[in-house]
Image (spheres, grey):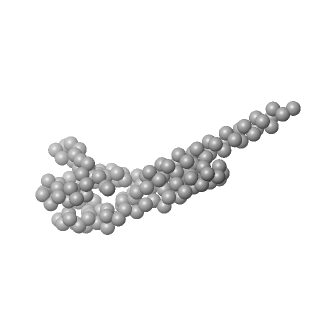
Amino acid sequence: MVQWYYGENGQQAGPVTESDLSALIASGRIGPMTLLWREGMPRWLTLSQISAEGGLLSAQSPQFMGYNMMNPTTSGYAIASLVCGIVGLVSCLVFVGIPAVICGHLAMNQIANSRSMVVGRGMALTGLVCGYLCVLIMLSFVTMMIFGIASRP
């Protein structure tokens, strides 16, 4: 569920759900110039800016949330990172762990800088952790092999 924060009397208020946000807009407590923010947005925006970017269909009819807010998309990079990270850990293949790390960082960047609702931060973070573990395990194995071969008479 999306949690929104809003500015009220120079202070941050919230979090509130989308339905609570709609009620606040309908009651007039939140107006077109009120600043709003939710996870995934790069910065605070006014209600009118969010409406203009397609985040809300209309500031006058708040009960109709925009398509992008009601149907968030999952980052494809986050899914790829998670899959590659798990496969890399199970198979201990470094060439699968490296794409997990790359896709994880791309997903985190995509989620943080998206104008629409993009989710998948947890998957991206899990893929990053698994990918880094895979690379660390593989580097440890290669280091042990090098020292083992070097110590032979």
Res 12 → quadrant = top left
Horizontal arrangement in the rendering, residue 112 relative to residue 16 (left or right): right
Horizontal arrangement in the rendering, residue 145 relative to residue 44 (left or right): right
Residue farthest to the left, as pictured: 27
Residue farthest to the front, as pictured: 90
Along the line of sight, which residue is nearer the eye, 89 or 17? 89
For the point 21% across and 56% down, which residue is it?
Answer: 21
Residue farthest to the right, as pictured: 153
Q: Position of residue 137 (x, y in %)?
A: 64, 42
Q: In this picture, is 23 found above or below 128?
A: below
Q: How many numbered marks does the figure carry?
A: 0
For the point 53% across and 46% down, which residue is it?
Answer: 129
Q: Position of residue 115 (x, y in %)?
A: 36, 59
Horizontal arrangement in the rendering, residue 100 relative to residue 118 (left or right): right
Q: Is residue 54 shown to the viewer in this render?
A: no
Q: Quadrant of the C terminus?
A: top right
Q: Quadrant of the N terminus?
A: bottom left
Horizontal arrangement in the rendering, residue 8 relative to residue 135 (left or right): left
For the point 60% across and 49% down, which residue is it?
Answer: 89
Q: Position of residue 73 (x, y in %)?
A: 40, 63
For the point 18% across and 47% down, which residue is it?
Answer: 8
Q: Position of residue 34 (x, y in %)?
A: 20, 53
Along the line of sight, which residue is nearer the eye, 13 or 34? 13
Along the line of sight, which residue is nearer the eye, 87 or 21? 87
Along the line of sight, which residue is nearer the eye, 138 or 91? 91
Q: Is residue 111 shown to the viewer in this render?
A: yes
